[in-house]
Amino acid sequence: MDRSRVLIVEDEPIVSMDIERRLKFMGYEVLPPVASGEDAVAQAHLRQPDIILMDIMLAGDMDGIEAASVIRDRKRVPVIYLTAYADEETLDRAQITEPFGYIIKPFEDRELKTCIHMALYKHKMEERLLENERWLSTTLRSIGDAVISTDRSGKVRYMNPMAEKLLGYPSKEAIGRPLDHVASVEALQNGCSLGDIVGNVLANGDGSRKETGTLHSAEGRKVPVEVSASTISSNRGENRLYGVVLVLRDMTEFVRAENALHQSVEDLRRTLEETVGALTLTTEKRDPYTAGHQQRVALLAGAIAKAMNLGEEQVEGIRVASLLHDIGKIYIPAEILSKPTMLTQIEMGMMKTHSEVGHDILKNVTFPWPVSDIVLQHHERLDGSGYPYGLMGTNILLEARIIMVADVVEAMSSHRPYRAALGVERALDEIGGNKDTRYDARVVDCCLELFRSGFRFEH
């Protein structure tokens, strides 16, 4: 069991206790955690840990990067940054301290254990050059990932048991052979081989690299893998590089879980599609004169949203809301919906309740988009003349501003019980003449351009 001494530097007590519990379970000796950079420097000198897990953002005047810099200058203790801050500026600043790795919160136990093992291994190689093969074989034997080390020429110097199992290649036959003769991974970036990765990492000095690809084992199996590579050097100041250590993680279960998740998402999306379709059909069964209205509004609204270069998910939300925007008409008596003459003021008042009714029907449905609010607002107008609340300008959701234009154009272009179709040209005149007053100018311009380019409703 590994009894390496670990110092945790973390200013969140709960997080610190969780990491301490995990490390003890893995068999490490955990020193009393500290919460500031100043304490980290003091304890590194007093306790002389084998490795330090250092959070970047700490209490006190000295953050983790500053503390690591001091520790590097005074004590040659390997530091792994354990942080939730992965922005480029922070990582660039941290890189100056030559850390032995980064672990981004949240993380898995295996990731933590592998990173610690690799940091200890790399540190050992730096401090003892390459005279630690016995330590290597015992320390890395328990890691769940395949570990391979090479010399500067790309020849294999060490393989742990997991590497033998994954590659289907005995370690005793691999030692001394070029890496590309032992392990073949395709679909890496720019068509590189593992040997190319070793060469590139060495050429970049004390660099590192991570990629994914498909491993072809000696037994003929194809295994999706994640490949991490970093240099082995004996003295940072002299920048003497002795080789590269590679970690190959079997991603089979991850890929299987990802595929299952994608299938689950597709099944849920199909169920949502079928449910929305059923609700749309229910509305139009009660209002035969507007049959197909919601589908045609969805067609035009979706086209406008794409013309506005909105994201794919936002376009889909607009399409779904369009298909449901008149669902509140379920509440309206059929004799009003199909009345062949103009509605009275009372009847029109009842008709105007359909957007609120639609909102009430949909508000408890957990859509990934604000569908109920879009439905509520689709009869609002930018100048405050709409209903139900007389909202104005950008207080109206963009999605609702798109659907209101599509709704007006489709409604005026189609027959209604109380009038014949007014035609597309009349509808386009309506939105064009009232853009920036009733209707969003950008939405109107995209709609007009669509029709000029040949867009037509499918009646």
Image (cartoon, rainbow, N blue to C red):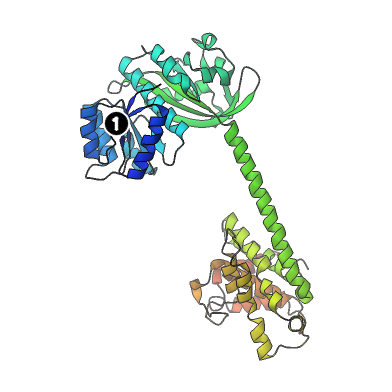
Question: How far across and down, in percent of the image, does residue 69 sit?
Answer: 25, 33
Q: Quadrant of the C terminus?
A: bottom right
At a point 48% along the width and 25% down the height, the residue shown is: 247
Name the foreground residue: 385 vs 455. 385
From where the camera sits, is residue 450 visible? yes
From where the camera sits, is residue 204 visible? no
Q: Quadrant of the N terminus?
A: top left
At a point 20% along the width and 33% down the height, the residue shown is: 42
Task: Identify the residue position indicated by label 1 in the image.
Answer: 31
Name the foreground residue: 308 vs 182. 182
Question: How far across and down, in percent of the image, does residue 209 sit?
Answer: 45, 30
Q: Is residue 437 left or right of residue 1?
A: right
Q: Is residue 45 left or right of residue 148?
A: left
- Compared with residue 88, is residue 228 higher up or lower down, i.e. above or below? above
Q: Examine the image and state in which quarter residue 84 appears.
A: top left
Question: How far across and down, in percent of the image, does residue 327 sit?
Answer: 68, 71
Type of amino acid at the residue the image marks with label 1: Leu
Name the foreground residue: 388 vs 408. 388
| Mark 1 secondary-structure assignment | loop
At a point 53% along the width and 19% down the height, the residue shown is: 163
Name the foreground residue: 78 vs 340. 78
Q: Examine the image and state in which quarter residue 442 appears.
A: bottom right
